[in-house]
Image (cartoon, rainbow, N blue to C red):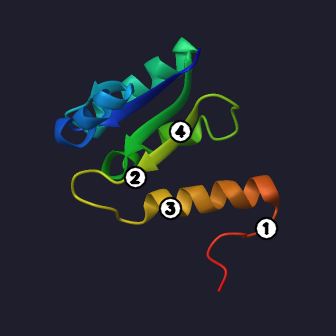
Amino acid sequence: MYKIGIIGERDSVMGFMAIGFAVHEAPDPETAARILHTLAKDETYAIIFIVENYASVISEDITRYKDSPLPAVISIPGRAGSDGSGMAAIKSAVERAVGADILFKE
């Protein structure tokens, strides 16, 4: 069975432990990048969530896994709230997969 992991600062990620996520506390983006690469090599993680404020700093590290089937690396808002980068990344992934922008149509 695959795991779901989350990487970020303590206040943003500890609540996810209650729903069964593998929680990985990172005090800074550089540590988050190291954890990301370790989890990706593990091959038991299907999804790895990273808080947006770290994901924007380590975007090059995340890009390495963009075309891999596993793990899916997804940024989510952290304790500071959303800066919009997570939704932009999801929108881009959907456009790549579907071939058109199917989100946010008015």
Work out whether mark 2 precedes mark 1 in sequence or the reverse, and give the earlier one.
Answer: 2
Question: Disc 2 versus disc 1: distance between alpha carbons?
Answer: 24 Å
Q: Amino acid at mark 1?
A: Ala
Query: Marks 4 and 1, how far apart in space?
Result: 21 Å
Of labels 3 and 2, earlier in sequence is 2
Which of the labelled discs sits on residue 73, or is there none? 4
Pointer 1 residue:
100
Q: Secondary structure at mark 1?
A: loop
When the figure is inspected, residue 4 is found, relative to residue 54, above or below; the finding is above
What distance separates the C-alpha of mark 1 from that of mark 3? 16 Å
On screen, 41 above or below 26?
A: above
Relative to 95, 41 lies left or right: left
Q: Amino acid at mark 2?
A: Ser
Amino acid under disc 3: Met
Q: Which residue is mark 2?
A: 56
How crowded pointer 2 is (Cα within 10 Å; few <14, some 14-19, many 20+) is rated as some
